[in-house]
Image (cartoon, rainbow, N blue to C red):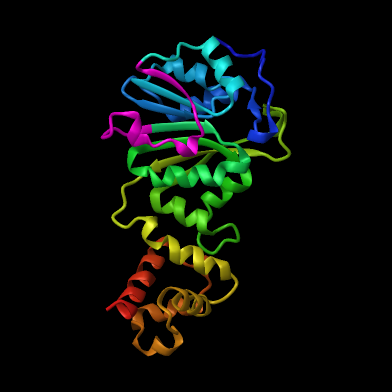
Amino acid sequence: MAIGKRKVKPKKRWGQHFLRDLRIARRIVAFADVTSEDMVLEIGPGTGVLTQFLMQAQPRRFVAVEIDPESVQFLRQHFGFDTPDRQLLQRDILSVELAHLGATDAQWKLIGNLPYYLSSEILFWMFRQSRRISQAVVMVQREVAERLVASVGSKQYGVLSIAAQSYAEVRILLHVPPSAFTPPPKVSSSVVLFRFQQQEQSYARIQPLVRQVFQYRRKKLLNALEYYVRQHYGQSFRQRMAEWPPQLHPFLAKRPEQLSPEDYHRILTGLQQLFER
């Protein structure tokens, strides 16, 4: 089935830009490498441009989550949903818990064209449930994609980079021009692949530290840590610097964007040993 003539009007309130290029849609689904053994969740199917190719791949289970009632009605008319293995949920994706979809020990493949205004929230929703996800292929604003894969020390490197790279191997697969959508957005998009890895030390452990120090990303870590320690421990970091492990001193002269996720784990361990013993 080729969903070419759409009867669903894109809505600004949900940031809808419907993908209309079927060649790109096929490539996105091919990147997901869906097999008959997979459990697949599609985020925001819209008019079903990706859905039609996902259905053709015949995954073991397929769940689509769409918030727009008009899109839901359209999808129900064109696809065989509402069987135990083919479900369409009219929900906000941020309210969905993968553990509540059944088969709690199984891992999902995620795929979708994320709305620009909500992409960061959806990505962090995905990271929070990463233990239940094997991989994800999602389309985001190109600027967001470049932040996801940014290397340490680059101007794009920040909280989103550290979070994504703490949970997964992240790679940009394809850049997509505005002309591929209806209506065309004002910016380019990118398709990003996440291959999730179960880390011994998760981003959740360092999240408060990372978010705090990146509020002062142009300052040296010494200054950023002073703010963090005063807020979290009610003490002065500078007054305890003499007890700071010597191997961690080189970090203090660096700025937040010059430190890797592993560096932040080391720094947090040092702070805990210094202020929580």
Residue at (45%, 85%) from the top-left corner? 236
Residue 56, relative to residue 267: is it above or below? above
Q: Quadrant of the N terminus?
A: top right
Residue 18 as seen in the image, left or right of residue 277: right
Residue at (50%, 63%) from the top-left corner? 211
Residue 175 as seen in the image, left or right of residue 260: right
Residue at (68%, 29%) from the top-left corner? 11
Q: Nearer the viewer, residue 132 or 29?
A: 132
Q: Nearer the viewer, residue 171 or 64?
A: 64
Q: Which residues are magenta?
A: 84-108
Q: Nearer the viewer, residue 193 or 140?
A: 140
Residue 159 pos. (x, y %): 51, 58
How many discs mark residues in the rendered view?
Answer: 0
**Magenta segment includes 145:** no
Residue 123 pos. (x, y %): 49, 44
Residue 70 as seen in the image, left or right of residue 123: right
Residue 182 pos. (x, y %): 70, 26
Residue at (63%, 22%) from the top-left corner? 21
**Magenta segment includes 85:** yes
Q: Nearer the viewer, residue 139 or 203?
A: 203
Residue 250 pos. (x, y %): 43, 79
Residue 181 as seen in the image, left or right of residue 159: right
Q: Quadrant of the C terminus?
A: bottom left
Q: Quadrant of residue 126?
A: top left
